[in-house]
Image (tube, rainbow, N blue to C red):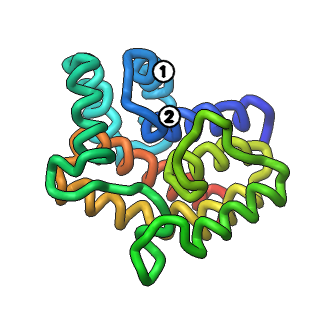
Amino acid sequence: MDKDAAKAVEAVYSLFSRGFARPLDGLFFKDWDAVLPLLTRLTPEAEEYLNAVSRFGRQTDTEEMNRLYSSLFLTGAFGKILSPCESVYLSDEGLVMQEQRDQVLYEYAERKMGLGPSFNEPEDHIAAELSFAAALAGDNGARGEFLKNHPLKWTGLFEKDLERFGGGVYLDITRSARIFMEFDAEVLSV
């Protein structure tokens, strides 16, 4: 992969990661609109979701963005606190900090990568896994294996929870991210 393609892949995964690391803000939507043409060209089947995210950013104020994030991921105001972590969706117990978290932590350590001190979520959180995919932008083989073994195994389940519990724009971001990961994995032939 040439340097420009690797930079684009890194930017896309970084943006998807930011979509779950904290409440959405105007800068996120500015960056989203900047990569929208590329994402629409690469994943036309995601166009509906990609454009829905862009519309949400234009039509929604910061207070509403914070309310939605808090309702879904902190308070469970829609009926369940969603924890977008691999362990929750793939462990028998449905709890955070299970074997799946240990597996990704090992993979991060193997590459001498870690999470920043301001990131307060488990290592198998969707934001962390997407950030790691961004860091692997220049290593197609490692990125493809990581996608196949981790986020692609569980984001569809998270997507179903978002659909069930009124995920709004986060459902559209998740669908867009999943479709992009599937595209990326297919291009990488994993």
Q: Position of residue 47 (x, y in %)?
A: 33, 39
User: Which is closer to the viewer, label 1 or label 2?
Assistant: 2
Q: Are marks 1 and 2 in contact (CB under 8 Å)?
A: yes
Q: Secondary structure at mark 1?
A: helix
- The residue located at (29%, 22%) in the rendering is 57
Q: What secondary structure is found at the residue carrying circle 2?
A: helix
In-front residue for pair 115/180: 115
From the top left corner, tell me how far across and down residue 50 is, in percent.
34, 36
The amino acid type, in three-letter code, at marker 2 is Arg
- Rendered position, 74 above or below 19: below
174 horizontally vs 57: left or right? right
> Which residue in the structure is indicated by mark 2?
18
Q: Is residue 75 visible?
A: yes
Residue in the image at 67% along x and 37% along y:
116
Q: Is residue 84 left or right of residue 14?
A: left
Q: Amino acid at mark 1?
A: Asp
Q: Which mark is residue 31?
A: 1
Label located before the other in sequence (1 or 2): 2
> Can you give x and y, in whole percent of width and height, for residue 182 in the image?
51, 58
Looking at the image, residue 123 sits to the left or right of residue 161; the answer is right
Q: Is residue 17 shown left or right of residue 116?
A: left
Residue at 44% over, 83% down: 92
Closer to the camera in the image, 173 or 71? 71
Binning the other alpha carbons within 10 Å of mark 2 as few (below 14), some (14 to 19) or many (20 upward) gives some
